[in-house]
Amino acid sequence: MHTSDDTESALSSVFYRDPLHRYPSVERGDGVYLYDSDGRRYLDGSGGAAVAAVGHGHPAVIAAIRAQLESCAYAHTAFFTNAPQETLATMLAGRFPEPSARVYFGSGGSEANEAAIKLVRQYWVARGQERKRLYVSRQQSYHGNTLGALSLSGNPVRQRLFGPLLHDWPKVLPCYEYRHRQAGESAEEYGRRAAASLLDAIKSHGAENIAAFVAETIVGATLGVVPAVAGYFGAIRDICTEHEILLVADEVMAGCGRSGTYFAFEQEGFVPDIVTVAKGVAGGYQPLGAAIARGEIHERIVDRFGSFAHGHTYVGHATACAAGVAVASVIDNENLLENARRMGTMLRDRLAAAFRDHPHVGDIRGRGLFVGIELVVDRATKAPPPASLGLPVRLRNEAMAQGLVCYPGGGTADGRDGAHILLAPPFTYTEDNVDELVERLGHVLEGLSLR
Ligand SMILES: Cc1ncc(COP(=O)(O)O)c(C=O)c1O
């Protein structure tokens, strides 16, 4: 099929994400707004994909990056450490609830999760438990697109083509109250039932073979911002401890303040063995990710092997870490966790009021400035919009036509059908920004008919 968009992309050498789509070119970012080369302004309602934590063009972050570039942009960390890496590691480890945590840097979320997979494996080998090689994760999750991280992801659409290249690791049920909690079941009972799915996997595969359980503390892109019910992660933590399985919290989206606390797990009452972060850690100013591991994991690996058998060229990149230090400092100095909590509550309340009678808004949920809106064909039956409607692309295009960047996704209900809109604005949002976001989203959803 040939479209006019093809003609446009034929002029370009870029291998676009969607070669049939014509993308406006972004020219400038300022605070909560992005501007394209035609001068159109877009309110950033999702930080791209939950990235722009402190907004665009923040002068303190730019100054820190500039200063680092002027002193030393990069020196390989096989030869040198650098001050930003040291400072950021201290900041992140200091936010981890236990002392002595260690921080292993990479360039994004997938790399952080790959590092976590290998840290876990090397830890168990160091402890003489060589059989531990399976990673249990959840259906309808997303952990990245590299082969290890994609193997963890319970996302049939993203996995489809690559099945023969992936590890066939066990998947258990997500904790997805809106669709899976049964009538007459309390949230607590439901949380226990969802957590018991991990016990079933342990029975089938044997704890001696399972290295880790990996879960997003708040499920972002695949479920549309679904926090667990109270008690679920506490039960998961107990099961992991009892069966000697490491617990990895993927907070690539939910972490670094997005949920209103620096780590989302702080609100869930558990401490993971490893937490991975990316996106918000440098807020999009530089590509950066990290796996933060309990001190014991570092100790066992170093005692037995001397070092972690892993590495990339850009581990501990000085300029990326300088951006990370600056973003974390802005979050502290501008009291942005508090603002994320306050604006997040306001956003959810105002969305609930605006869409109270909208026939296709089934659920509004989230924590802090991490908010999901699940769309349904019918509110009473919760019937999901069929995948054939192509809603995510339609919604993205309509939102951009309305001057709004939000992050729609599909497959919400069962991995295939269903749709949601993910909102993850900069933590610098004001009440006016919240109102503008709700108003623009209102225009996007105004004409939406799924019947
Ligand atoms: C929870 C989660 N983990 C991992 C990733 C992968 O991160 P990246 O795209 O930076 O590789 C993502 C990306 O959306 C994510 O949402």
Image: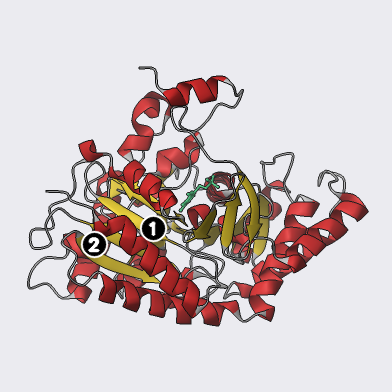
In whole angstroms, how far apart are the C-alphas of marks 2 and 1? 23 Å
On the question of residue 181 being in view, the answer is yes
Q: Amino acid at mark 2?
A: Ala
- What residue is shown at x 44% (from left), y 39% (from top)? 150
Q: Is mark 1 within 8 Å of ligand 1?
A: no
Q: Earlier in the sequence, mark 2 or mark 1?
A: 2
Q: Nearer the viewer, residue 415 or 89?
A: 415
Q: How many marks?
A: 2
- What element does badge 1 sit on? strand
Res. 329 image quadrant: bottom right
Q: Report whether 167 appears left or right of 362.
A: right
- Provide residue 177's location: percent of width, then percent of height: 22, 65
- Provide residue 291's location: percent of width, then percent of height: 60, 55
- What residue is shown at x 38% (from left), y 36% (from top)? 158
- What residue is shown at x 55% (from left), y 72% (from top)? 262
Residue for badge 1: 422
Q: Amino acid at mark 1?
A: Leu
Q: Nearer the viewer, residue 29 or 84?
A: 29
Residue 276's disc number = none
On the question of residue 260 being in view, the answer is no
Residue for badge 2: 194
